[in-house]
Image: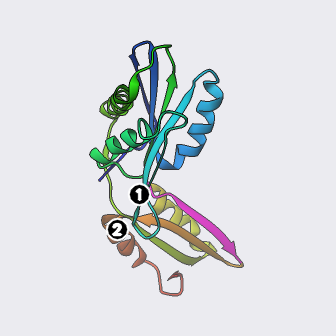
Amino acid sequence: MQIVTQIYTSSIEIKKSTFLAFLCPYEHFKTLLSNLKQEHPKAVHFVYAYRYLNDFNQIVEDKSDDGEPKGTSGMPSLNVLRGFDLINTAVIVVRYFGGIKLGTGGLVRAYSDAVNEVICHSTLMPFEIKEKIEIAINIKNLGRLEHFLNSNALKFQRDFIDERVILSFYVSKNEKEKFEVFCKNFTPLEIQRR
């Protein structure tokens, strides 16, 4: 499986219709779609497809033809994402109609080509399943732990409860091993797995 870590864009023109494709991490999908609708008020269609892993590591997929004939745009876009084995990724194709109808086959090809084009101009990264870790620590140890997490580029959330801090973050297998080595410097009372 593969992912993207930033937003990519490309554009193709077919029979005077312009197809602007935007590939993004799934977490940016809703915001990007909302922004594109504001930035492109004259566009006629905002077709999308996405694939992501839920909390049970099951693949969730969805798509929208957004007014194009059923099955001519959302499904072809989703199939391209599947073909590249992309996960936690969304694609949005903004179409400006050029006055010439493309027909069912033409639309399928156009949307597939638009998604292929943006993927080919993107940097795809290998995907690793990450495990969620939640720990409770004494507030006096927060600086040391945050330094470790930041220096290993691990994003985390924290909640303060009395004199303790609850930290939650996701780690790959290698990151988990590093974290476990780091934890050996603490006494069991200073850091507790939840």
Q: Is residue 39 left or right of residue 86?
A: right
Segment tinted magenta in the rendering:
153-161
The number of discs equals: 2
- Tag 1: Cα neighbours inside 10 Å, few (<14), some, or many (≥20)? few
Name the residue furthest bottom.
189
Q: Residue 191 in the image: state x and y as whole percent.
A: 51, 80
Residue at x 40% of width, y 43% of height: 75
Q: Closer to the N terminus: mark 2 or mark 1?
A: 1
Instruction: Measure how far apart labels 2 and 1 are at the Cα level.
Output: 9 Å
Q: Secondary structure at mark 1?
A: loop
Q: Name the residue tied to disc 2.
A: 178
Q: Is residue 47 left or right of residue 10?
A: right
Q: Name the residue tied to disc 1.
A: 152
By secondary structure, the bulk of the magenta-drawn segment is best described as strand
Q: Which mark is residue 164?
A: none
Residue 128 vertical placement versus 80 (above, below): below
Q: Residue 8 in the image: state x and y as whole percent.
A: 43, 33
**The image quarter in which residue 130 lies:** bottom left
Question: Are the residues at dot 2 and dot 1 in contact (C-beta closer than 8 Å)?
Answer: yes
Residue at x 32% of width, y 33% of height: 116
Residue 2 vertical placement versus 53 (above, below): above
Residue at x 54% of width, y 30% of height: 45
Q: Nearer the viewer, residue 123 or 41?
A: 41
Residue 181 vertical placement versus 34 (above, below): below
Type of amino acid under label 1: Asn
Q: Nearer the viewer, residue 38 or 129?
A: 38
Name the residue furthest right.
162
